[in-house]
Amino acid sequence: MKLGLHRPVLDGKVNFPLCLAPMVGLTHVALREVMRDYLPAEAYTIWPTEMLNSRRIPGENLEKTPETMRAAYEPGLVPQILGNEEDAIAESVKRLVEWGAEAIDINMGCPVQKALKHNYGVALMGDPAYAAEVVRMTVKNSTVPVSVKLRAVGSTKEFDELLTFVSGLRQSGAAWVCLHPRTAAQKRRGNADWEQIKQLHKAVDFPVIGNGDVQTYDDAINMLKETGCDMAMAGRGLAARPWMMWQLGEELGFAPPAGKEGQKAPRTSEEEGAEYGKCLLRLIDRCRFYFGEDLAMRKVRFYVRTTSVWLPFGNTLVGVCAKARTIDEMIEGVTKFFEGPVEMSLRTELRQ
Ligand SMILES: Cc1cc2nc3c(=O)[nH]c(=O)nc-3n(C[C@H](O)[C@H](O)[C@H](O)COP(=O)(O)O)c2cc1C
């Protein structure tokens, strides 16, 4: 049975069915760089940014703004924008394509108050015609494919509503959609309803990416198998264990990541715990390189708060990072924390 990619994503360039989710404060250049080291050689996937406000992009220095910093070699970049005004969208898209975007993703899932107030993010889902119009104006101003990331509308019973909504996006030129089947009211808690991903994939003829609750490579495989979707997108779980890409690559017959030839992906809870430590130290180094000491420390602290929930003494690690006054102190504390064996659990209840 073929796992994912039944329909071509990025004109068939993507050959790996797992990708990272856009996450404010997390999906930045430093994390992408750490994560890319675990992508199997020859694998091609898409890489998001944090959501970017299309009203701000036109006036920003993209090379220097933390949210849009990028490494020299970053194939597959798909920045995510938030917006609803054609002028701002047009200028943002133009700049992002020059910056290296291979597609543009539109956020229609953000439930925060600010996005609701400005009538973008999940607010667009309450107005199908307007949402379709946002896609139309983005496609019209873009030389690269345009995708949309959305949330569930409600229960499976309201699936027809979702389908009508998605059909409108498709008619306006959306190349693919990503569905995070939790409702806005659920925020990021509770179970993601994968059944909606399955139904949506069955009902449309263009690529569907599934998202929500993928914590391990097994979960990714199950999502791909159970829903038939084209790609699995993972947020918190993949940020916590970037080597999930390597593990999945092994299952799918990909060669190990470059530089890891002849090695096997970490599998046991102790191997994973040790790898988390290595990854964190590398992330600290990369954050310092890109963001400078102060911002780097804030980004690392946020990363640890979000991802240490898979570690038995995650709170202690959060404390170590919070207490450190300098990056060097942070490195020292983290190194010490991982001196003994640390076991990483496979699943946890996601709350944040
Ligand atoms: C800290 C954080 C920030 C997020 N920011 C964004 C965002 O900028 N754009 C977006 O579409 N979704 C955002 N999300 C939602 C994720 O993309 C994803 O849909 C959600 O976390 C469910 O996937 P997961 O269960 O694999 O984490 C964010 C999630 C988290 C945890």
Image: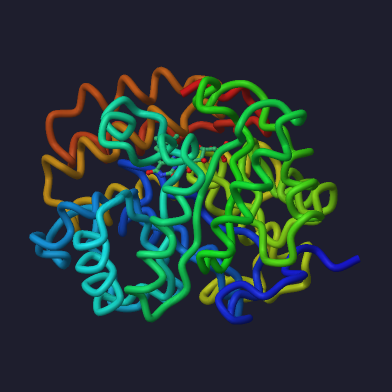
Horizontal side, residue 1 vs residue 156: left or right:
right
Residue placed furthest toward the right: 1
Tell which residue pokes out farthest to the front in this image: 129
The way the protein has been coloured in the rendering is: rainbow
Q: Tell me the residue at 51%/45% (across/down).
A: 128
Q: Which of 340 and 103 is in front in this view?
A: 103
Percent x, y for residue 310? Answer: 56, 29
Rendered-image quadrant of the N terminus: bottom right
Residue at 15 percent of width and 57 percent of height: 65
Q: Where is residue 301 in the image (x, y as percent from the top left)?
A: 29, 32
- Please, is residue 110 above or below residue 135 in the view? above
How far across and how far down the image is residue 103, in percent?
43, 71
At x 31% / y 59%, what residue is drawn? 29
Closer-to-camera residue (234/286): 234
Does residue 16 sit above or below 229 in this rendering?
A: below
Q: Where is residue 220 in the image (x, y as percent from the top left)?
A: 71, 49
Left or right: 53 in relation to 224 = left
| Tally of numbered discs | 0
Does 38 sit left or right of 96 as displayed? right
Q: Nearer the viewer, residue 154 or 285?
A: 154
Name the residue located 69 percent from the left edge and 65 percent from the top edge. Answer: 249
